[in-house]
Amino acid sequence: MQLPKPAADFDITIIGGVKGGPTGLFSALLAREQGLSVCILEQREGPLPIGRADALNARTQQVYEVADVLKYLRPKGLKCNTSSVFKDGKFVSHNNTWWVSLENSQYKEFLMIGQPEIEKALLKRLDVGVRYGVTAESITESAEGVEVRVVGDKGVIRSRYLVAADGAHSACRKQLGIGFAGDMPNMCWAVLDTFLETDFPVCDEIVSFEVDGQSRVSWIPRERGMARFYVLLEGEVTQEKTQQSISQHMAPYKVVFKETEWFSTYNVQERVAEAFVSRGHGRVILAGDAAHVHAVNGGQGLNTGAADAFALAWRLKLAISGFNTQVLQIYDAERRATAKGVVDVAAKLVRTTLKTAEEYVALIGKNAANITGMGITYAPSSAAVVASSVGAFVAGARTPDFVFAKAKVVEIRFYELLRYGNFVVLNPQGLALDLPQSLDAHVDVWEVSKRDTLFEVKTAAGAILTTSFDLGQDLTSAIVIRPDLYTGYVGTDVLGYFKGFVL
């Protein structure tokens, strides 16, 4: 199944932008976890020092855990699962139903932590360097791969694929001629990271402030005792006007801005690229803000980019290993549909800031599937998702996390046992899979049997575990879990599933 490797310096080139998020770094880490060679080009002069994204949702915490990154972030971040409303000088509501009701997940809150810390954690795990201060002058795609010419460098970087994670103003996307249509409502927001001196009843909750029937100010609690404010203003947007608006909304309490770490503004854009995979030879793939942009409301930006990376890297490994490149076209279909949903939710939320804070928080609750990241699903519109289910394993939905007992004493969660890159097949004992040898390095088979009221599982590594979690009471169907930890198929024709889009 291996194809001859073309003359390439790397398997993957990853291009990041001046204002890009950590999507490129996460893509690189996941590629390296699978043994792929990568070249990381960042237009920025160095790691991000301050500002930008501020929260990991529950799903991103799950995928960062599997990538062995979360352990660096949980101790530093602030856990927050409540959205509150403050008006007329007092709190009038506190809501967290959509978080505490999450099932089959260890994480039931936002982890508030700044993008600089997230990037530090990713860089700590990466075993290759980043070429900062490098701008791609041109990219040329062929049937064999991609060539990148760098500004001021006479050489050419050759790779089999290129991941364009170079932000909303993506030069890669523009060179490929991929449209980036959408809306641009006339809304300019200020963002302020600051340390306050105040007699306001500070709490680890997201606070929406209401004045004159509108909710133009939100307070996001942050690590290190910092406060992040989002403020919608009219006319010229300055730091002074931003602080005046915050003080007005927090009245009657006193506010002193002791130290402001970062101030920025942004105009809301709502756009989704017309294609996430290049139309020519399919060798350039968009991810993160290069593929989709929207308002920050709901904290979906960085998290959607992380999901892009988690959905992409395993497919690149399969394509580079000589399997069906249809896996990349399915990335395009699944992630574009998801991006459209994310943009729609953010658009509703940002417009609702012109209404009451109660209406705004209620809308968050209605769209919790997106905001927590845990309810995002893929439709059975491709061979990668075959409509089927057993218990909590539903094709197209995130795979549940649950507890195993190890040696009948130690408890360990399913996600703690997983490492990125391979399919996992929970296979009833005695069910013949008949998978070809070419899949051996890409599929881990865990044998499942019933022991009284418990399920006994033998992992691909040979560990024996037990669980009371429902893995199929009659044990007649295998459960296929994709490398991005979505259930792909439940049934007996596992070979047929892989023939549908991998083989």
Image: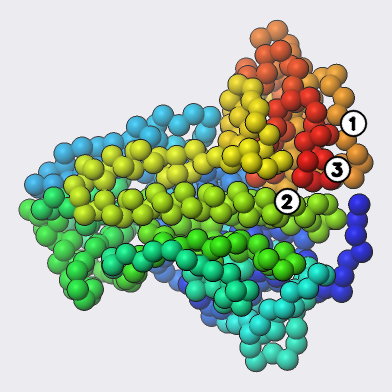
In front: 344, or 190? 344
Q: Is residue 411 left or right of residue 144?
A: left
State the quadrant of the C terminus: top right
Report crowding for label 1: few under 14, some 14 to 19, many 20 or more residues within 10 A (C-alpha). few
Q: Is residue 60 left or right of residue 362?
A: right
**Residue appearing at x 38%, y 53% in the figure:** 346
Q: Measure the C-alpha gap from mark 2 to mark 3.
A: 15 Å
**Residue hosting label 1:** 434
Position in image of residue 44 (x %, y %): 53, 77
Q: Amino acid at mark 2?
A: Val
**Residue hosting label 2:** 327
In front: 464, or 155? 155
Position in image of residue 198 (x %, y %): 16, 56
Q: Name the element at disc 1.
A: loop
Report crowding for label 3: few under 14, some 14 to 19, many 20 or more residues within 10 A (C-alpha). some
In front: 63, or 481? 481
**Residue hosting label 3:** 439
Compared with 322, 192 (above or below) is below
